[in-house]
Amino acid sequence: MFIPSEYLLSDLLKHRVRCNKGIDHGIGVFAWMHPPVHRILGWASKPSSLKLGRNIWRLNQLKGISNLEVFVKGNCSETDQATLERLPTLLYADVLNKNGDKLGTIADFVFDPITGNIFHYLVSRSDPRIPGTSRWRLTIDLIDDQQPGFIFSTINSLNDLPLSRSSLRQDILSKSQHFRDQLQEISNKATDRLEGWLEDPPWEEEDNSLNRYREYETDPLDDWDDNTNYQSIGDSPTSSSNFQQKDSRFSKFAHDEDPWV
């Protein structure tokens, strides 16, 4: 069955434990680790909400991981919650900088499911039990010392650490800032175009082109010859004799065709 090379502790504790006999041993509730060497040794599951007992599983019993369950082989060890609380762990320990100021709390860590070696811890600035909070990656080389409930680091602030997961609030702020930058860029482009349009109005170009066109435009009546000489008076389109001749023809035709005359 599939086992990833890197795994998140919170994902392991979200899965239900099922043994090779098909028995459901409940969901994970606790990580059993050895803090001096930064290694996880196993985890505990809660088989029933009505019982106070807990089942302890060694990490080498892990044989496969699915979407909802982890599969183990062999028998578990039984203990109670009071005993688990006395086991050493770095989860929910306070992270202190080199001046002794608190920076955050260990909320999770990434480890190798085969060897149990922890690659890095995830630090939360606020309560790690609040969903959607930010996580900063704290590597092993940045840890100077650890004691029960405390981790001493060599950094000054969380800004010195890479951000592994941003909070919902941080995502909203970053997206809104991106939208504001886009709106500002659009506004600057519109302002530049408006200023250029006001400095060089388009109607000035139209007036100049119209004046250039009028310089070349000529009046066709300027070439009209008022002293036109016709060969004969009869050729003139306004000759009175031609007009009288047409009028008499029309009167004769009208008299002949009228049956009431």
Image (cartoon, rainbow, N blue to C red):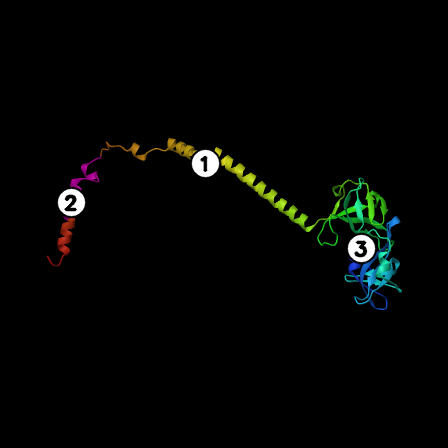
Name the residue tied to disc 1.
Answer: 202
Q: What percent of the width, then of the height, locates residue 224?
A: 28, 33
Q: Earlier in the sequence, mark 2 or mark 3?
A: 3
Name the residue tied to disc 2.
Answer: 245
Q: Earlier in the sequence, mark 3 or mark 1?
A: 3
Image point (58%, 43%), residue name: 183
Name the residue tied to disc 3.
Answer: 9
Which part of the image, by quadrant, shows the C terminus? bottom left
Q: CA distance from mark 3 to mark 1?
A: 68 Å
Secondary structure mostly seen in the magenta stretch: helix
Q: CA distance from mark 2 to mark 3?
A: 121 Å
- Residue stretch in magenta: 230-248
The residue tagged with tag 2: helix, strand or loop?
helix
Q: What percent of the width, then of the height, locates residue 98?
A: 81, 40
The residue tagged with tag 3: helix, strand or loop?
helix
**Which dot, 2 or 3, sits closer to the camera?**
3
Q: What percent of the width, then of the height, locates residue 195?
A: 51, 35
Decide if residue 131 is on the left or right side of residue 115.
Answer: left
Determine which quarter of the picture holds residue 231.
top left
**Which dot, 3 or 1, sits closer to the camera?**
3
At label 2, which amino acid type do we have? Gln
Q: What percent of the width, then of the height, locates residue 182?
A: 60, 43
The verdict on residue 137 being magenta is: no
Is 177 in front, or is 209? Answer: 177
Decide if residue 27 is on the left or right side of residue 208.
Answer: right
What crowding class fits label 2: few (fewer than 14 Cα within 10 Å), some (14-19), or many (20 or more)? Answer: few
